[in-house]
Amino acid sequence: MSRIECERCGGRLRLSIPDAAYVCVRDPSNHFWPRGEAEQRWIAMWRGRAEADPSDVEAALGLASVHGTIGSMSLAAGEAERALALFKDELAILEALHKAHGGDGRVQEALLESLGVQAEIAEQSGQWSTCLTVLEQMLPLAQALHDARPRDDERARALSSCLNGIGRMHRQAGDLGNAAAYFARDLELISSLCARHSDDAELATELAIAHFNGYLVSREAKDELEHLQAAERILDELAGNGTLAERGADVRDRVKAVLGVMPAVAARSPEPQRAAHASVEQADSEQGRRAWLIGRVEKELQRRRA
Ligand SMILES: [Zn+2]
């Protein structure tokens, strides 16, 4: 894609914020350009190419990409508003391109990535419903890309993060049924990724987290227990062979804490399990039960850390 590179030697450029200039990593003292002029020139150059031949997909992708790249630079320079405007421009170019070349994998990938930026911005600023809308736009793209090349790990991960995101947004909105459906699809996808890369500790951690998510939205005590035990098994194994990273360790603490406060009988036979489940539920709704359990977990964690 249109990496921004040194106009003299093709070297990589970095943005020097204090100098407001782009500096070539190969020859920083001779190859540098004032930032504003350079950015305008790059955009104008790609726009010229794209407009010269509207059927040139590469040129249109380059024009979109240069907006995205300068947007990222602006974000790094602390100019959030300018960055957001550039990301929006990038998206608009890609959406128009997708209308004309919807079947082109390069266009689908670029559009998916650009929408991903929008979803992340919405999630980070707490705009849940916007985030959900964007993720739902992403899903058919991510699914089509995955279906076209099911063994492409990067595409599988993109689909996974989309399914997971939609699940999170539904959970955020209190729609546990929908959340469970998306988390289950994500779990299945990560399981198949893990099966192909059985020694990848990071993927195994993702699988454990997918199980923990499954637990969070389960309606039946039996399902909760199965998810927690699956997560525990995976994380214990990672801990056993010394590949448990910090994120996994945190989830493992949580899993063990929840298992520790779950009614002991729940783990044993189906008969008392129903009773235990009912006794937890009796006072309250699903949400209340969840709050009760999370409260217990937090207390347990505080106790262990104290
Ligand atoms: Zn250079």
Image (spheres, rainbow, N blue to C red):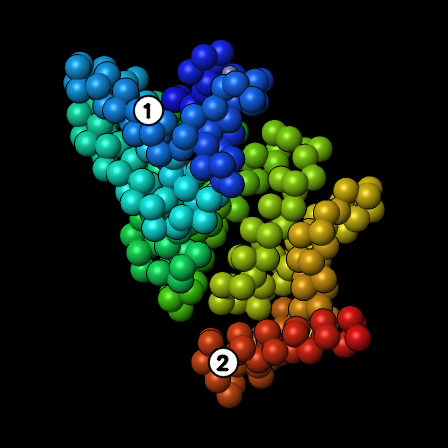
Question: Which residue is found at the position 77% from the left and 51% from the top?
Answer: 236
Eye-nearest disc, 1 or 2 = 1
Q: Left or right of 107: which side holds 250?
A: right
Give residue 63's position: percent from left, percent from top.
Answer: 29, 26
In terms of depth relative to the viewer, which is nearer, 41 or 244?
41
In this figure, which residue is indicated by the disc labeled 2?
288
Q: Residues within 10 Å of mark 1 (few under 14, many from 20)?
A: some
User: Disc 1, disc 2: CB below 8 Å?
Assistant: no
Res 270 seen here: yes
Residue at 40% x, 59% y is 125
Taking the image as shown, residue 205 lies to the left or right of residue 287, namely right
Name the residue at 61% across, 36% down: 194
N-terminal of the two: label 1 or label 2? 1
Q: Is residue 210 above or below residue 170?
A: above
As drawn, the residue found furthest toward the top would be 9
Residue 240 image point, x, y percent: 82, 46
Q: Label 1 amino acid?
A: Trp
Residue 264 quadrant: bottom right
The numbered disc on residue 42 is 1
Q: Nearer the viewer, residue 96 or 73?
A: 73
Q: Identify the residue shown where x is 59% and y is 74%.
A: 294
